[in-house]
Amino acid sequence: MSATIRVAAAPISWGVCEVPGWGRVLDAPTVLREMAELGVQATELGPPGYLPRDPAELRALLGEHDLTLVGGFLAVVLHADREKALAEAEESAALFAACGGDVLVLAAATGLDGYDERPRLTDTEWATLVETAGKIRDIAGGHGLRTVLHPHIGTHVEQQAEVERFLRDSDLGLCLDTGHLMIGGTDPVELAKRFPERVAHVHLKDVKGDLAAEVRAGRLGYTEAVGRGLYVPLGEGDVDVASMVRSVQAAGYDGWYVLEQDTALGEASPDDVPRRDTERSLTELAKIVQAL
């Protein structure tokens, strides 16, 4: 390869999600073993309760599969009940740091189950959201972690105007999630070019543009869209992943590229689908990196 990058995985690619009723969940040893067999060397943590929350147990389990921890996702309500959000951030940051992680991926949860509804915030609530995110950054920093804000469907930072408003109002870096940005109406390639200094973490996804447009227009629920194949292996959807990687690499990005293909496994879904799709994404990513 003419360039090297750091590639990690995440349990969501194996259908592991915090949303109630999302789908069938494969056991952790199977998921971690398949990650390792594919040559992945690190993972994000996944939803609370899937992997052990005891640091010694988590380090031991990851070690069994020669995996390290990148960090993890934390979706908390930032615009209200600040003390609860800060307490959850403290617990997660301590765990991530104790197990070798270096990034806390923060999302502005609505407080509702799932990602299909999104109440509107007042300006006061938005200001609280930004301030709470800053306090979480400070908490995580005390544990040696970076905090990045993850624009995410069904959260209060989803659409392009909200992403750009957050960039104006906060100094946190962004998790550039190619799929969620596109579904929310933001071109991830263009965003990376406009704000290269704010790209602090990358989630690589590919999505079908037609289904993304249906979700964006409110004609299709996010969960239903995932079940209908919204996410596809890299190179098989409508995100220009190659251009995005070239752009952030040219800007000096040296962080993780976390492969995430949000998957929901039905009762009849074959167990080998997540591994197969992740392998296809890894093959495509290797081609992209080879061409850098």
Image (cartoon, helix red, strand yellow):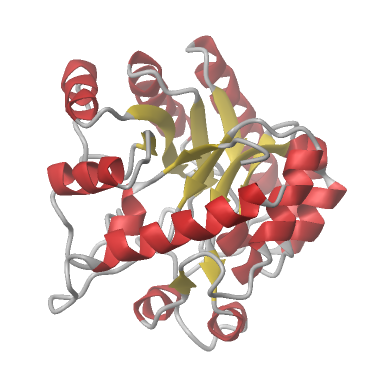
Horizontal and vertical percent position of residue 189: 75, 58
Q: How many marks?
A: 0
Q: Is residue 81 above or below residue 26?
A: above
Horizontal and vertical percent position of residue 197: 80, 35
Write the residue at 53% across / 74% down: 236
Q: Nearer the viewer, residue 149 or 201?
A: 201
Residue 42 in view in this figure: yes
Q: Nearer the viewer, residue 270 or 131?
A: 270
Dividing the picture into quadrants, the one containing residue 288 is bottom right
Dividing the picture into quadrants, the one containing residue 175 is top right
Write the residue at 66% across / 30% down: 254
Q: Is residue 129 above or below residue 141?
A: below
Horizontal and vertical percent position of residue 123: 72, 51
Horizontal and vertical percent position of residue 64: 17, 27
In the drawing, does residue 247 fall left or right of residue 238?
Answer: right
Q: Nearer the viewer, residue 257 or 281?
A: 281
In the drawing, does residue 155 fall left or right of residue 59?
Answer: right
Write the residue at 15% across / 48% down: 30
Residue 204 in view in this figure: no
